Image (spheres, rainbow, N blue to C red):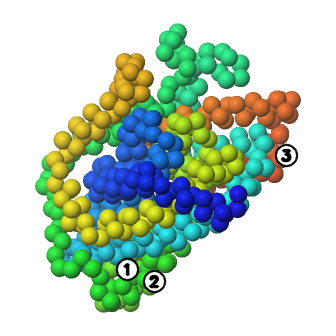
Amino acid sequence: MGGLDGLAGGFAIAFTAANLAWAFVGCLLGTAVGVLPGVGPAVTIALLLPLTTQLEATSALIMFCGVYYGAMYGGSTTSILLNSPGESASIATTLEGNAMARRGRAGAALATAAIGSFVAGTVSTVLVTLVAPPVAEWGLSFGPPEKFALMVLAFMTISAVLGHSALRGFASLFVGLFIGLIGTDVMSGQIRFALGLQELYDGIDVVVVAVGLFAVGETLHVASHERRVVETVERIRGSLWMSGRDFRRSVGPWLRGTAIGFPFGTMPAGGAEIPTFLSYATEKRLCKGPDRFGEGAIEGVAGPEAANNASVTAALIPLLTLGLPTSATAAIILTGFQQYGIQPGPLLFATQADLVWALIASLYLGNVMLLVLNRPMAGVWAKLLTIPRPMLYAGIVVFATIGAYGMRNSWFDLFLLLLFGLLGYAMKRSDIPVAPCLVGMILGPRADTELRRALQISQSDFSVFLTRPISAALLAFAVLLVAAPVLVRRHNARRGRA
């Protein structure tokens, strides 16, 4: 199916009443969780996973994506009004956004954030439409060695890049690999690591793990570190719209932020934090406006907000075409695909073309919905910041428990939920990233299968991974991801001593 034909079919599916409703629900929830500090899209989608098991796959995944990029819109509200980023990608926005709010220009800051997010999201969605099909076609040439190398790259990416320590990232990854291998081996039929418990013969449900690690673990961590200081929420004073001068000053940063953010989203080592700070630094160098940076320059809000939305949209390219998650939220969405027995990757555009194009079409619709939701309702979103935190955290734990039990009506699942919730809490306390654990559990069994298939084809010759160009290049890139930071630190240390 061609790109334009596929997109036309996707719009026909996305414009059905049910899918429009679920897209709206996802955008609404995404904006809300973006506003609430400590509650992010990964936690929200993890909570929704067990509650959407009876929902049609296309509708559920449209809603998940709405939550994902909706949170980027909502995160700017918290950054500007509370000086506390709801998402890590919104940290750069706090630097100028809150300064604008203190000067009585919160409305203009919120407006440039919303319009910049719309511009960046729309441009990036057009690029996803154009780029994703060729990447998927390229992926169809992958055999078992290339697929295994790609998963190794995913392991290295998510472990070495997320978090402050590669060693802790790999520790989290190996825990996930172990959890993923529990149960019956697909190729041999042998029971592995089940400890004699029949409940583990079919393995551990990835949804229970995701809800436990992200929803329960994150909630326990945030609740235990609740700050006792009183936070000041800046009031929205004056007009909620931008002046003509504000608009003219924002156009350039919107476009530059999109150009910076999109490439980072497509990279295996991407993410939204780096491009937002690069955009902020770029605008600081180029700024010629009357407001100095640090005192409320509108360019410092427009650029980073465009960069983080472009990056989030672009992250769908490696996720859909190669099955490669580049963030914690992307890993949760990958879990959502697997919940319906769908495996993202090169074959997705051939086997699930209607679903993929409906998902891409929903991005266009979602950006319009989010612009409408964010501009007139800015005051409503600001009131969410007054919700008592204990009530919020208690509600998350209750929904997580009901969802986990309702999947199979199993008390053993509740035990696992508590176990992984405590594990997630311990990992947060120890500054161990949670995303590598989930990625290891999801991709570990597939990597095991592809490794054994590749060795069967090559008659146990491990050189097959180095003699095939694509697998060798992917493995080399994976090694570079781990080695480059170490080499840079050593080089800087030698220069410092010199």
Q: Position of residue 188 (x, y in %)?
A: 71, 18
**Can you name the residue that lies furthest to the right here?**
459
Residue with the mark numbered 1 = 299
Q: Residue at x 36, y 52 (%)?
A: 25
Residue with the mark numbered 3 = 467
Query: Mark 1 falls on what kind of element?
Result: helix
Residue 470 lies, with reference to residue 245, above or below; the image says above
10 Å crowding of disc 3: few (<14), some (14-19), many (20+) = few
Amino acid at dot 3: Thr
Q: Earlier in the sequence, mark 1 or mark 3?
A: 1
Q: Earlier in the sequence, mark 3 or mark 2?
A: 2
Q: Residue at x 16, y 75 (%)?
A: 237
Q: Nearer the viewer, mark 3 or mark 2?
A: 2
Q: Residue at x 74, y 55 (%)?
A: 137
Camera-side residue of 495 and 108: 108
Does residue 171 appear anywhere in the picture? no
Amino acid at dot 1: Glu
Would you say 422 lies left or right of 56 here?
left
Which numbered circle lies on residue 252? 2
